[in-house]
């Protein structure tokens, strides 16, 4: 609520298109009414508001982790559908300190312990956190002074969640001077170290990496000559970028990619196909990860591609989906494109029912064209924003 009011004031003064979205996880009976209340506040501020409801959780797994991932995915889709390039989040210095402790327990390195960045790129959207220097108490005092209400989520006090446990530990450590602001200083220094490593990785990527048809290609000899930390950064970033993933892969997943890069062969991981041939390493989308995805013509498919029709095309009943084996069989000239079979299988195609209409990447364009919503410039730039 503090973020909403602060940004509303700022947007009016700067002529910025501001919209708000609330995710209703459906986990508490009061959540629907709370989301509606936010809508009423937004209406009073003149800010368009949308409610996105989370469905499909089967009650298994880590609730908070799954809810968070689903929430980000819903917000990313909402932002892209409304032509918004950025989403602002209300994380505070307290959230930063809790994240630091939780990642410390997991044995995180520089990236993990530098915690949440004020700006990062994921899921095709810039995520902004403008309140990381403020505490929750700062925000409560600011709201109370202006007689603006808010709602405290009771799950934020449930001790069975790791984040709540971290919050309790911070309370115990306060007498030692280890509080949210102290840990914020630590994460700032670690963020400076991460920035230096990212700049080194970017310089290396510009020398040995390129983007082709949505895949990332890396020269294996150049990769092998880099320090281990920079190799890991380049590979983890390529995997996350191709998959449009919210987070880079975990270490165990990354080890498999490093083995392929060093010894050759191929492996599927993190929603990607990683293949080493000769002096090249190619990271492309995995067909199994996209085979059920569909989009309307000219809408974003797989958070990466837009497919545009030729002038005067009949768009009735058309959809964008992965080419797959059936589609590839209908593209006899696919080898002439020079693109790997695996990349084409996971690439965008135009279908009417079960009939292939066009496959721009596979040599059957028929006047259609496929364009990356995020191209090479985004690949390189996002090395510095994660």
Image: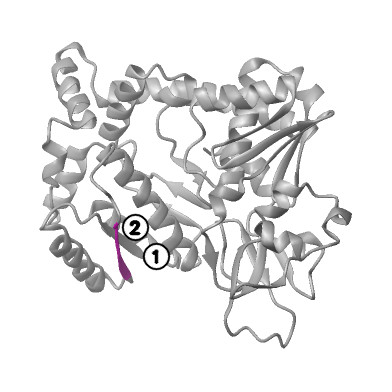
User: How many other residues sit within 10 Å of disc 1, few (<14), some (14-19) or many (≥20)?
Assistant: some
User: How many other residues sit within 10 Å of disc 2, few (<14), some (14-19) or many (≥20)?
Assistant: some
Q: Quadrant of the N terminus?
A: bottom left
In the rendered image, the residue lying farthest to the top is 176
Q: Is residue 20 left or right of residue 378?
A: left
Which x, y percent locates residue 43? 24, 73
* Location of mark 1 (residue): 18
Q: Looking at the image, which residue is at 81% across and 22% down?
A: 221
> In which quadrant of the rendered view does residue 75 lie?
bottom left
| Magenta span dominant secondary structure | strand
256 or 386: nearer the eye?
A: 256
Residue 211 in the magenta stretch? The answer is no
Choose the circle earlier in sequence order: 1 or 2. Answer: 2
Range shown magenta: 49-55
Q: Looking at the image, which residue is at 74% across and 25% down?
A: 264
337 or 45: nearer the eye?
A: 337
Q: Looking at the image, which residue is at 63% across and 37% down?
A: 238
Q: Is residue 299 left or right of residue 144?
A: right
Q: Secondary structure at mark 1?
A: loop
Which x, y percent locates residue 355? 66, 74
Q: Looking at the image, which residue is at 28% across and 34% down?
A: 95
Is the residue under label 2 in contact with that under label 1 (CB below 8 Å)? yes
Residue 91: in sight, yes or no?
yes
> In which quadrant of the rendered view does residue 113 lie?
top left
Q: Is residue 188 left or right of residue 329?
A: left
Residue 7's label in the rendered image is 2
Q: Secondary structure at mark 2?
A: helix
Which x, y percent locates residue 263? 73, 20
Residue 148: in sight, yes or no?
no
Which x, y percent locates residue 335? 85, 53
């Amino acid at each position: 609520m503090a973020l909403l009011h602060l940004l509303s004031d700022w947007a009016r003064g700067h002529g910025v298109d501001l919209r708000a979205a609330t995710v209703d996880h459906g986990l508490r009976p009061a959540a629907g009414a709370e989301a509606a209340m936010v809508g009423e506040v937004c209406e009073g501020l003149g800010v368009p508001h949308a409610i996105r409801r989370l469905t499909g959780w089967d009650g298994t797994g880590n609730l908070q982790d799954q809810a968070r991932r689903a929430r980000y995915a819903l917000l990313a889709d909402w932002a892209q559908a409304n032509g918004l390039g950025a989403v602002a989040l209300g994380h505070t210095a307290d959230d930063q300190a809790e994240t630091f402790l939780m990642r410390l327990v997991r044995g995180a390195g520089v990236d993990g312990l530098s915690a949440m960045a004020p700006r990062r790129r994921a899921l095709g959207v810039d995520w902004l956190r403008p309140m990381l220097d403020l505490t929750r108490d700062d925000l409560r005092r600011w709201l109370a002074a202006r007689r603006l209400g808010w709602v405290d989520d009771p799950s934020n006090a449930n001790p069975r969640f790791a984040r709540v446990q971290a919050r309790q530990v911070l309370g115990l450590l306060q007498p030692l001077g280890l509080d949210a602001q102290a840990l914020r200083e630590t994460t700032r220094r670690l963020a400076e170290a991460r920035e230096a490593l990212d700049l080194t990785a970017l310089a290396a990527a510009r020398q040995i990496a390129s983007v082709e048809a949505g895949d990332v290609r890396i020269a294996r000899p150049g990769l092998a000559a880099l320090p281990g930390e920079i190799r890991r950064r380049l590979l983890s970033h390529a995997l996350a970028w191709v998959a449009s993933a919210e987070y880079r892969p975990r270490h165990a997943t990354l080890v498999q990619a490093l083995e392929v890069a060093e010894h050759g062969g191929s492996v599927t991981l993190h929603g990607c196909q990683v293949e080493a041939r000769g002096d090249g390493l190619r990271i492309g989308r995995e067909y199994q990860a996209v085979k059920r995805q569909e989009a309307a013509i000219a809408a974003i498919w797989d958070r990466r591609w837009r497919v545009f029709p030729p002038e005067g095309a009949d768009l009735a009943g058309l959809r964008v989906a992965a080419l797959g084996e059936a589609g590839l069989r209908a593209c006899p000239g696919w080898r002439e494109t020079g693109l790997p079979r695996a990349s084409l299988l996971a690439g965008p195609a135009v279908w009417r029912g079960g009939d292939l209409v066009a496959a721009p990447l596979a040599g059957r364009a028929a006047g259609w064209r496929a364009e990356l919503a995020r191209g090479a410039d985004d690949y390189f730039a996002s090395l510095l924003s994660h």
